[in-house]
Image: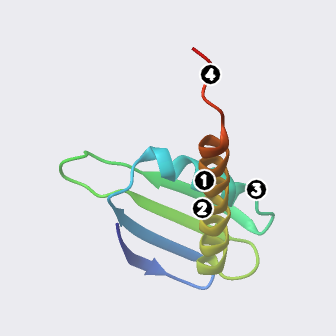
Amino acid sequence: MEVKILAKEKDFIEVELQGLNETILEPLKQKLLQDENVQQATYQMGHPMLARPRLKVRVKEGKPHAALKKAAKAIAAEFREAQTLIEKAKKPKA
């Protein structure tokens, strides 16, 4: 995965995310929107062969980069928890 910052302002950030798809981007967007300091969070996929996904975040307060990092950490923790639960799940008896 490669992340490139395309635009950064006081209350806005736009990043290009190579190697990600909606499987990660949608939960990340939803997590951002749960943050009361986030005003807007959207992503664009474009054509899979021609464009890289872009994520845009605008905040009411704070720094957009910090909000993005916070959401990414929360999503990563949720995926780790799911992985742990799956690994601990017992196989059904045959």
- Residue 92 in the image: above or below residue 17: above
What residue do we see at 68% from left, 56% from top? 31
Between discs 3 and 4, the one toward the N terminus: 3
What residue do we see at 74% from left, 72% from top? 60
Going by the image, does 61 lie left or right of 29?
right
Based on the displayed image, in which of its 4 quarters is residue 41 positioned?
A: bottom right
Q: Which mark is residue 34?
A: 3
How many numbered marks appear?
A: 4
Crowdedness of circle 2 by 10 Å Cα count: few (<14), some, many (20+)? some
Which residue appears farthest toward the left when viewing the image? 49
Q: Which mark is residue 92?
A: 4
Kind of residue indicated by mark 1: Phe
Determine which residue is flagged by label 1.
79
Q: Distance between the Cα atoms at labels 4 and 1?
A: 23 Å
Between discs 3 and 2, the one toward the N terminus: 3
On-image quarter of the N terminus: bottom left
Crowdedness of circle 1 by 10 Å Cα count: few (<14), some, many (20+)? few
What residue do we see at 61% from left, 57% from top? 80
What residue do we see at 48% from left, 54% from top? 43
Kind of residue indicated by mark 4: Pro
Between discs 1 and 3, the one toward the N terminus: 3
Q: Distance between the Cα atoms at labels 3 and 4?
A: 36 Å
Crowdedness of circle 4 by 10 Å Cα count: few (<14), some, many (20+)? few
Q: Secondary structure at mark 4?
A: loop
Q: Position of residue 22 (x, y in %)?
A: 45, 45
Front tag of 1 and 3? 1
On-image quarter of the C terminus: top right
